[in-house]
Each structure stands twice: as C-alpha cells, then as structure tokens.
Image (cartoon, helix red, strand yellow):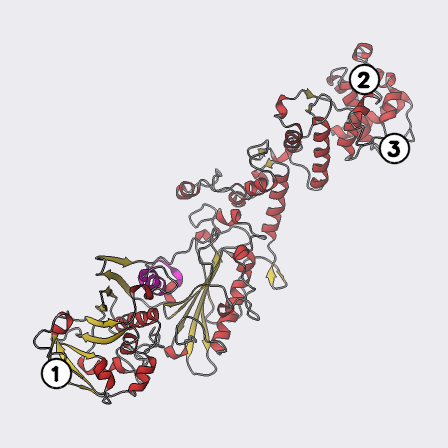
Amino acid sequence: MTDPTTNDGDASGPLAGLRSKVGEIPGAPEKTALLSLSTLDPDRAVLELCDNSIDAARVNELSGTDIELVLGEDYLEIRDSSGGIPEDSLDVWLTLGASRQTDADGYSLSDSIGWAGVGAIEASLSIGQSVMLASRAAGADQGYAYYIDEEYLETDDWSLDYYEYDGLDPGQTIVRIEDLTIGHEDLYGDYDTLPDLLSTTYELYLADTTTIPWADNTPVLDVDLTVVDEVNNRSKSVMADVSVDWSYLNFDSAHPRAYQSFELANETTTGRVRLDIICGLSRTKHPKSGVHLYANGRKIFDGETSYEAGFGFQNGLNQFRSERHGRLVILVLVRSLDSPRDIPTENNKTTLRDGSDTTKAIKKRVGRTGLMYMHLADVHRVPTPMSEAYPGEQTFASNGGQIELLDYSENQDVRDHPGGKRSGRYYELEELETFKQITKRHAKLCLSCPDVLKPRHRPAYHGLRHEDLETEAAVQLYDETKGFLHDRFDAFYDADKRYWAEPVLVEQDELPPMDVDVNARLETLEQLARRHAQADEPFRYLGMKPWERPYYLEQLYQFAGLDPEELPAHEHLPPEDKYLYEHGVLPEETTEEDDVSSADVAPKPSSTDDTSDLSFPEYIAANQSAIAAVARENESEYETVTRMVEGYASLASMEELDDIPIEAKTPEEKLRRIVARYREIVGLTKDN
C-alpha cells in the first residue's frame, strides 16, 4: 500500500498525525472474507463502531465514556474516550466478531454487545473506501494507527503496517472513514435522524437507570454521545428516557410487576442467560406499545408487536391489536452470563433467532407473565379513563406507586398475576367488573354517587379531579382528566345535545335498589317523558323518585326541545300515565294512539269543592267506585293504597293520614293496615 506518511509533504488532517512505521500486524482471516462482509447497511455499520466503543469502556472498567460521531463533507469519524488499545492488541480490529480486547473465545466480555460484530474495519468499509484507525491506551506515551485504502485491498498481502500517531489524548480512539459511499440521509433507516437511531439503540447506556429497580440486569456504564454535523455547523447531544408512565390501577392488584432472574440454559450450548421481564399498563396509549427487548443492554426490539416478539406464539401472547392493546408495555432484559454467543439474536441484532431453544424459552415466559396484562390492556375490559387515573404519585396508586419486584431465581413457574381466581387462560377481575357495572348503571341514569365505592376506586370513577386526590403533583398535572363515569356518560349522551352537563350528584340512600331492572325502568321513563312532551299542554312531573328524575328530565328535554324547567310542573299524573309509571306498561285498554286524550275519559275522584272537608275515611267512602275502577287485580295492596293516598292528597293535607290511629313499625306496614281498614269501610273485597 502507499505509505500514508509520504504524500509529497502535504499530509494534512488526521494523516498529519502519522509518524514513522513501527511494525506489521500479522494476517488474520482471508481478505476475501473481509471484503464479503463489507456490505452492511449504513445504520448497522455505524452502530457496530459504537458497540466497539462501549465494549472497550467496559473492558477497561470505566464508569463512563464519551462518544462523538462527526459527519464531514466526505468523511465520518467516531471518537471515544473508552480507554484506548495497547500496541500489542491492535490486531483486534482485524478479528471477526472481536471487540477490542478479547478472551480465549474471541470476546472481551461475557455480556459484550459486540458479540455479533464484524469488526471496525469491516463496518467502516461498508460506508467508505478508506479507513484509519488510531488509538492511544490509557497510561501510554504514544498512540498508534494504521490505514487501509483501495490499494491495500487490491494487494495479495494481508499483513498491515502500523505507525506511531500523535495528537491523541490518553485513552482516546478515532475511527475515520473517508471517501464515503453513502450520503448522510442514508444513515437513519426507519428513524428521522441519526440521533434518534442512537438514542433508541443505546437508551439504557444514555439514560439514568440508577433509580430504576429493575435495571440491575443491565451493564453499568454512563455514555455521553454527541453527533456533530460539520457540514451544517451544528451538534446535538443524544439523550434518552427509559421511564414509562405506568398505571398503578388500584383494582385487582393491577400494578406493574418485574419478574426477575429467570435463568435459561440453552440446550445447544453450555451457556446461561438471565431473563428479566417487566409487565404493566401505561396510563394512556403508549407511543411504542408492545415488547421492548434489550440484549446485554443494547435494544433489539423497540415496541415490537409481531410473532418475533412472542405475539401469536403458541403458549405465548395473543395477537396484538393496536386499537385494543395500545397501553401494553413489556420490557424484556436478556443478559448472557457465560458468553455473548448465547444471546439468541440474528447477526443483524434486530430480531431473535427463530428456532433457538433460548428464543422459545423467552417467548414462553413473556407469554406467562404478560398475557394477563394484555387482557387488562384491552380497552373493552379496562377503558383508558380507568387506567389514566392512577399515576405513581397518586394517593391511591396500587403498591404505593412502585413496580412490584419478584425473585424467580429459584422458581420458573409464574404465579404472581393481577386478578383473582383463574378462569381459563386469565384471572377473574372481580373488582373491575363490579366497578364497571355500578358505574355504567349510574351513567345511564345520569347519576353520580361516589360514596357507594371504596375511596381507592373513586379516582377511576371521577377522574383525577376528585377531592380524594391529596397529592399536589397529581392534581396539578392531571386535573383535566375525566373518569370512567364521565366517559360512559359522554358515550350515552351527546355532549352537544344533552340536558345535564354532567351526572347529577345524589346521596347513597337515593340510589335504586340493586334488584331494580334499570334498563326496563329507563324505557318506562322515556315513554313517560315522550307522552308528557307531546301532550296538548306539555308538562313535567314532580313525583319521580330522586334516581329517576335526572333521566326523566333528560328525555323530556330531548322530546320537548326546550328546558324542562320552563314547562308547567304537575304533582300528579293522569291515570294512564300513573299506571305506566307504576307498572311499566299502559293499561290494556289504552293504546299509544290515544295515550294523551284518554286522560279525559278516565274516572276521576270528586272535586275539591265537594270533598275538601271530608276526612280520610269519608273520602274513601265517597269515592269507592272511582277507586275500585282504577284498582286492577294484578295490583299489590301497596300499589292500591298508594293510589288512594295520592288521590286524597290532591284534596286535603297528607298530614291527616298521620292522624289515623294505626300503630306500625314501618310506613309500608302502616299502609297495609290502612288497606285493611279501607276494605272494612267500603266493603271492597280482594276479588274486586
């Protein structure tokens, strides 16, 4: 090859640092092998060089390193402070799969991230026609370099001259690739910029993981990574954030869990692999839901939802649906304990090796730990307003807002799941199902009654605006959140066309009994509201029970097309409406066509002028025929006496009823005795 130190005295730039020849590096593999491997994708080539820098820092037992990628007009440089390479180890760059300093198997670390690497030269020649590698070991007085160009590649000699090199700091290494065969735009792949690609791939090295309890299965090394664009005179520090906005949903212990220290033994090798899996739900849809897999700290899957990540895998996870499972987040940390060869990834480091025993074991355990969380993530089972209400700092966050750490070093059978009793592949979610039934019932009725729920369930009911949220940070950050009640209320009633702005607050004792068929009752109230809105003189009825009134007014608003409060208020219903209100159907002889006009022919009690001075027994006697006409054989005694009391109330004070000397423990019992008294007075038998 041409001596790079002699160029008619015009050596400049990096080559100016080259001094006299020191010696030769002996041949390693065949040059044809080198050339055949020099066809990497540009992104992969750059990442291979960064892998080398990170591995070198760990081999040299550094706590951190600085890596700088410099993009020039026709060159690319990777500079690091990873400890440098001693003169007697310079041949590591020419060894396939090696990462700077190596052990007997060709690897420097049992958990190296360069295990599938092709070496710095191979990566460099994939994106440029010449490369210079220069390094100065920490503590060394001199740096060394060698230079590979097209002339060298065309010779039959594999041995490579190396030279003294000036201008390096102790522990610094530079890889400079010139005569690029790619453009800057070719470096990004599926990412918008090179910093995005680097941030994703090395996020565990770039982010602060010291406060993350599950990160003890990742290499400890702080990396400062910078991209310098000399063409456009700008630079950018590459940052990363590995935090997840977990939902600590306080139902059925649905907080995230870390299943730590599974140990997998590959049947085809003697190597061991440690596996940690963290499963949970994000509060809202995650921008990259699915599986995030790290192999020895380097990211392999970035929100993967395919078969390769375990979805649709036998005994694994179900098929992923983004519209249903967008809150599912599963972090998988794989770390080789004996040799990086045991990491089951393809050479491109972007997928697991299909068919590998270790790959199958990983997918199986991801399924066992993550399936229940996938069940929870389904928005049909746990709507987002419920999960959104429980950030880690929330007063009622499950497990104190902390990921639950579970040690599986001695137990491979996964038993710790959210939920209760197992049913099929899943566990029953009794708290969630009960909560959903109660909340939907309230929303249909346009009601709000948080007192019927446990305090820890109220945030999901109301959202984070509820008064029970005492944590200042939660209130400040999430005060616009609506809970499941408002979500259901909005779903049932169009926000632009409804009467109530939000569900009406009622007391717990004003709620309907649980045995009431709410759907049937709503149909009755809707029918009544339509009749009242379409009457010759529309009106609103005041005698509804507290839990019936909000829905009745909502429907009256829809049918009347104006504010119900503007309608005349009636304290009593026409007989047909009264029968409909009490029985849920109109009287048999009444049809929908004449439902309003029928009130004109219904039997009516005597006028106030005729009976205003009558006592209650006298009133009953005077109106025996009218009362008997309205009484139906299928009416209960309680319903019959209710008609009597309301009829009398239109003529005289209800207080007079209290004057009847009948002792009873409850109002219902007193009414039953009044019925008996009534029969005695008017001679009305049960058959009538």
Element at label 1:
strand
The earlier-in-sequence mark between 3 and 2 is 2
The earlier-in-sequence mark between 1 and 3 is 1
Q: Residue furthest left?
A: 9
> What type is the residue that disc 2 sits on?
Phe
Residue 541, given in percent of the width and then of the height, sits at: 69, 25
- Tell me the CA gap for discs 1 and 3: 117 Å
Q: Which residue is mark 3?
A: 633
> What type is the residue that disc 1 sits on?
Lys
Image marks 1 and 2: residues in contact by CB distance under 8 Å:
no
The 10 Å Cα crowd at callout 3, few under 14, some 14 to 19, many 20 or more, is: few
Question: On the rendered structure, is 391 left or right of 155?
Answer: right
Which mark is on residue 21?
A: 1
User: Is residue 208 magenta-colored?
Assistant: yes
Residue 479, given in percent of the width and then of the height, sits at: 44, 40
User: Is residue 299 magenta-colored?
Assistant: no
> What type is the residue that disc 3 sits on?
Glu
Q: Which residue is mark 2?
A: 616
Q: What quarter of the picture does the N terminus occupy?
A: bottom left
Element at label 3:
loop
The 10 Å Cα crowd at callout 1, few under 14, some 14 to 19, many 20 or more, is: some
Q: Which residues are magenta?
A: 194-214
